[in-house]
Amino acid sequence: MSRGPRRRTNRKPETPRPVVSHDGSGHAEPVSAAHAAANLQTGASSGPPAATSNRHGPTRRRIDDLIEQIHQSADKLAQDDSSRGDLKILARTMLELRYAFKVFAPYRSKRKATVFGSARTTPGDPCYQQAVALGRLMAEAGWLVVTGAASGIMEAGHIGAGRENSMGLNIMLPFEQEANRVIADDPKLVHMKYFFTRKLMFVKECHAICLLPGGFGTLDEGMEVLTLIQTGKRDMIPVVFLDEPGGSFWRDFEQFIRRRLLDRGMIAPADMSLFRLTDNVEEAVGEILGFFRVYHSMRYVHERLVLRLSRPIDDEQLDAINREFSDIVVRGGIVRSGPLAEERDEPELAHLPRLVFHFNRYDQGRLRQLIDRLNAADPK
């Protein structure tokens, strides 16, 4: 587990010096803030990392523009007379994210399930065994399993998936939190100081979320994921709350949401479609895999939402969808389309059929219901 520099107790005036980063690689490297900003280029791509250095034309120019924005922001920090504490937060954040992007970049083409749950769950607990089975089934389906890399549910998910199919995002706490024996010293393990950078990576890099019973951290992660999806800050993904067989942990949680949030008008009825509850691990895996039966991915292009599909839908299905979901279409209708010009930076997806429409960007629960409707068109 990498450690940050020790605090000095004798605070003397200092001359400016390079920031020393322990960025999760286990090695310290001296960097300036501007150099750290430039290094974000590594791993910032959503495609295979090998393609980054070979990009030309508009895509290359857009990347160069973003790097220049980072440089300018770094330069303005000096003009702003920023405090040393503020600079430390920014420098560490950039270093952590740059390294995490670099670690995850080679695996962007593989689907990943993030698994949350208590670090205190013991191997004899039924929830632990559920997590082992979940990791095993997801790995057998060709997925990677991402966890917080510590003990309990996190360890169980990695035991099921095996080292080859595991990735980890460990948190550096004031008390020791060692990486579990499956992922320890693996190049797919990242150590992070800040919870917010860690949670960003958990959600940004995954294609599904599964939560098993846990404490404050698990509840925080679950509610944040639902908030990001409900507000459209995260593309739609399946979220499954998995309990032990016959357990009521998440059923009690759902009842609280219904009584205290839904019944009081604090969420919409359709928001209950953003997640699923089950105590059956096969059902949990089926929910995750079934989400991508027809639906593949989504992207906004200006005011239009593009839904990529793994197979086309017929005229009857398209008519039914237009009737059932006209309430979330701002104008026009839901139409078939090939790749839009703005999607040329994702040539690997050009072959997929698409549905395009002007989504109101508000009714995310209804959007999830639309995706469920598309997937139901292929019952296999």
Image (cartoon, rainbow, N blue to C red):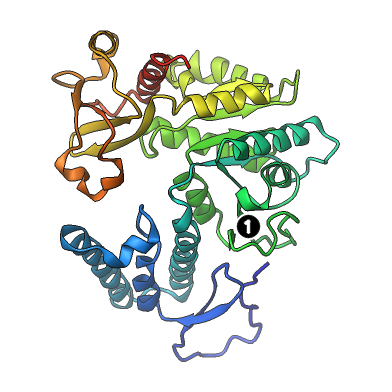
User: In which quadrant of the rendered view does residue 227 lie?
Assistant: top left
Residue 17 is situated, as x and y percent measured from the top left of the image, at: 46, 88
Dot 1 crowding, Cα within 10 Å, few <14, some 14–19, many 20+: many
Q: Is residue 52 above or below residue 182?
A: below
The one of 12 and 185 positioned closer to us in this rendering = 185
Residue 77 is situated, as x and y percent measured from the top left of the image, at: 33, 73
Examine the rendering and report whether any part of residue 239 can be seen: yes
Q: Residue shown at 70%/25% (left/top)?
A: 249
303 sits left or right of 32 in the view: left
User: In which quadrant of the rendered view does residue 312 lie?
Assistant: top left
- Under mark 1, the amino acid is Ile
Residue holding disc 1: 171
Examine the rendering and report whether any part of residue 253 can be seen: no
Q: Is residue 151 above or below residue 214?
A: below
Q: Residue shown at 46%/91% (left/top)?
A: 15
Q: Is residue 188 above or below residue 336?
A: below
Q: Residue shown at 70%/36% (left/top)?
A: 131
Residue 354 is situated, as x and y percent measured from the top left of the image, at: 25, 29
Number of callouts in the render?
A: 1
Judged from the image, the secondary structure of the residue bearing numbered disc 1 is strand
The one of 80 and 155 positioned closer to us in this rendering = 155
37 sits left or right of 118 in the view: left
Residue 216 is situated, as x and y percent measured from the top left of the image, at: 66, 40
Quarter of the image containing the N terminus?
bottom right
Q: Residue shown at 46%/19% (left/top)?
A: 273
